[in-house]
Amino acid sequence: MKLQRLLSLTRQALDTYDMIDSGDKIAVGLSGGKDSLALLYAMKNLQKFYPKPFDLCAVTVDLGFGNFDLEAAQNFCRDLSVPYTVVTTEISQIVFGSRQESNPCALCAKMRKGALNQAAKDLGCNKIAYAHHKDDVIDTMMLSLIYEGRFHTFSPKTYLDRMDLFVIRPFLYVAEADIIGFKNRYQLPVCKNPCPVDGKTKREFVKNLIKSINAEAPGVKDRFFHAVTSGNIPGWPVKEE
């Protein structure tokens, strides 16, 4: 995928779901993975011509595994002229050490988001941008169906009233395969995920399940996404009959 196409899809989501207002200061959650690197790259380039002016910064939450090399991410932000903050935590010790969670992802995600939210507030931001893409929308919907028995997924824009922050997801219309292509084309400096359960989660199971279904019924991903966008899920704009 070329940059022009990525910017077009990103702007489509921003405009459709009214994600940006003039004067926003947006913290991009930078995990070091391909999705968040691509999002920061896209948002920085959109900043140059988007009709509503906004400021950007990047924030990484270091979970404390001790082997997370962020030099490439630091250089990436420097080259983009984006202020970069690393939040040091002991989340890994709490989740895998003292708590010894059998299903660590939920607690880890909650603590990681809490640290990111607080960092964004401390930096004077009013919005946080997550790099959740189209496949994440579908995967989360399927996780909810299988493990919770409800038709649900995260919303394009969420207000966190306790923190007085908005979470926005500008990559809603971008497929993961296109992000992979973009990462390869523009040689984004991906940082290795140090988490010991990476690739061994329920989400990974669901991703493979959907891939299998899509192989048997081509186009099912697009139909799943249409079901989400037209399904009047809480947090999503209501579709008129």
Image (tube, rainbow, N blue to C red):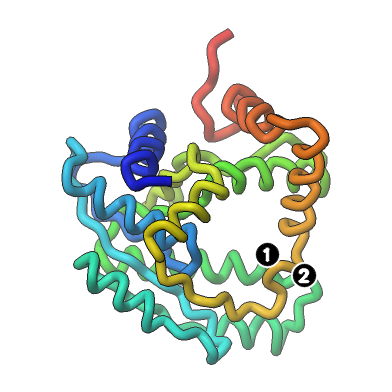
Residue 90, above or below 236 = below
Query: Residue drawn 23% across and 70% down?
Result: 79
In this view, the residue in front, 10 or 155, is 10
Disc 1 to disc 2, C-alpha distance: 7 Å
Is label 1 in a helix, a strand or a loop? helix
Q: Are marks 1 and 2 in contact (CB under 8 Å)?
A: yes
| Occupied quadrant, residue 57 | bottom left
Determine whether, in the image, residue 94 is placed left or right of residue 62: right
The image shows a total of numbered marks equal to: 2
The three-letter amino acid code for the residue at tag 2 is Asn
Residue 110, percent from left and from top:
59, 65
In this view, the residue in front, 102 or 184, is 184
Residue 24, percent from left and from top:
24, 49
Q: Which residue carries the number 2 mark? A: 103
Residue 229, percent from left and from top:
57, 28
Query: Residue drawn 45% across and 50% down?
Result: 160
Q: Which residue carries the number 1 mark? A: 106
Residue 15, percent from left and from top:
34, 31
Is label 2 in a helix, a strand or a loop? loop
**What number is the disc on residue 226?**
none
